[in-house]
Image (cartoon, rainbow, N blue to C red):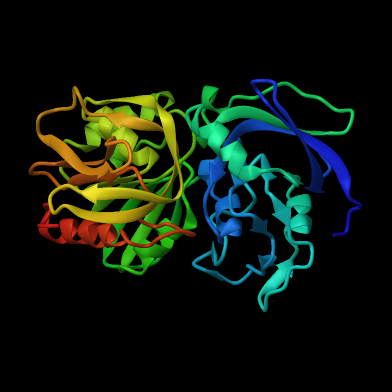
Amino acid sequence: MKNNIKKAMLVLEDGTEYPAYHFGASVSSSGEVVFNTAMVGYTESLTDPSYKGQILTYTYPIIGNYGVPYSSSCNEGIQEFYESDKVQVSGLIISYYSNRPYHWNMCFSLSDWLEENGVPGLYGVDTRFIAQKLRKKGGSMLGKILMEKEDLPFYDPNQENLSEKVSVQNKIQYGKGKYKILLVDFGLKNNILRCLLRRDCTIIRVPWDYDFTKEEYDGLVLSNGPGNPKIYEKPIYYLRQAMKKERPIFGICLGNQLLGIAAGGDTYKLPYAHRGHNQPVVLLEKGQNFITSQNHGYVLDTTNISKEWKMFFKNLNDNTCEGIIHDCKPFFSVQFHPEASSGPTDTEFLFDIFINSMENKRIFQV
């Protein structure tokens, strides 16, 4: 490591303190402490806009061993190995930092990359114990990374609209395919773009608060994103108008919650959040199980949702809703990440369902 080893501390909102060693940027930071169970894919997770405002804790003990890949080569302006153009987390907590990384595609060490992005990291912490503690507190707690002799207040990212910080500011077009997709960016992962481009699509990416009701398109995609879904009143209003057009709609993660609210449902914060790359879900129509990647604390309550809707997927750990689908119109959404990068790709077939719904103007047999 370029920096000398420095002591720092993780402080949680319940007052517990965890002495640790510092790497990355020499700054203190505050946010919502969450966890991830992945063995690999830290560059993808750290650049995922869904983690905006969060301090990410990895339960896998060794992180940094393959460094950070070189990612200037882009397709359609999309970086190859990252899920956005920068590190999005507020901090990183790991058990053991591998300070001698090696990989044929390595360009930076993880420490140098975090330093370049102004993000602090801590190691020498029992991250699996912290994950257990977080699970008992709804999957997250407020926390802060403090350098020596520094302090700052706790920060709750769920109290503000984080999409304003991670969404694009203007329309961007990708590809020249057969299907015109209007993609609302609440903090989308690049792999959503990749999955659609592989399926012969022209993508029009628009800001989170864009009035998409005035646009012509073959299909509408609502991306993932950070924060509390009830903050997004404007796009929920636009979505209710768009549902009158009966053009196919596909919601992912936050997009699932917004579609559910537009359909008359509600959301609430889970007592045990869904984090990590190993969340089991069941496709109710077939009874088929899948392993999915998830990072969310809010979930859809379908108690008062319109009768035309039904549950599409269910979480096998706590039986909560993992997706909804309309009885006759081509509208559906899922809470997990079918585009998972990194993570399991078991459910990427949902993009094929979406493409087929544009061809047939309805949801075909899953």
Report the residue at 60% width, 57% height from top: 42
- Please name whichever residue, 62 or 348, is drawn nearer the observer in this view of the structure: 62
Q: Is residue 71 depicted above or below 360 in this figure? A: below
Horizontal placement of 261 versus 20: left or right?
left
**In which quadrant of the rendered view does residue 106 lie?**
bottom right
- Please name whichever residue, 333 or 288, is drawn nearer the observer in this view of the structure: 288
**In which quadrant of the rendered view does residue 99 lie?**
bottom right
Horizontal placement of 183 versus 102: left or right?
left
- Please name whichever residue, 61 or 206, is drawn nearer the observer in this view of the structure: 61
Q: Position of residue 272 (x, y in %)?
A: 43, 32
Q: Is residue 310 depicted above or below 68 in this figure? A: above
Q: Position of residue 273 (x, y in %)?
A: 44, 34
Report the residue at 24% width, 26% height from top: 265
Report the residue at 37% width, 42% height from top: 253
Q: Most extreme residue toward the left, as rendered?
A: 328
Locate the N terminus by quadrant: bottom right
Locate the C terminus by quadrant: bottom left
Q: How many marks?
A: 0
- Please name whichever residue, 108 or 271, is drawn nearer the observer in this view of the structure: 271
Q: Position of residue 268 (x, y in %)?
A: 36, 24
Q: Is residue 4 depicted above or below 134 in this figure? A: below
Q: Most extreme residue toward the right, as rendered?
A: 4
Report the residue at 33% width, 34% height from top: 257
Q: Position of residue 118 (x, y in %)?
A: 76, 45
Q: Is residue 81 depicted above or below 93 in this figure? A: below
Q: Is residue 286 visible?
A: yes
Q: Most extreme residue toward the bottom, as rendered?
A: 104
Q: Is residue 168 visible?
A: no
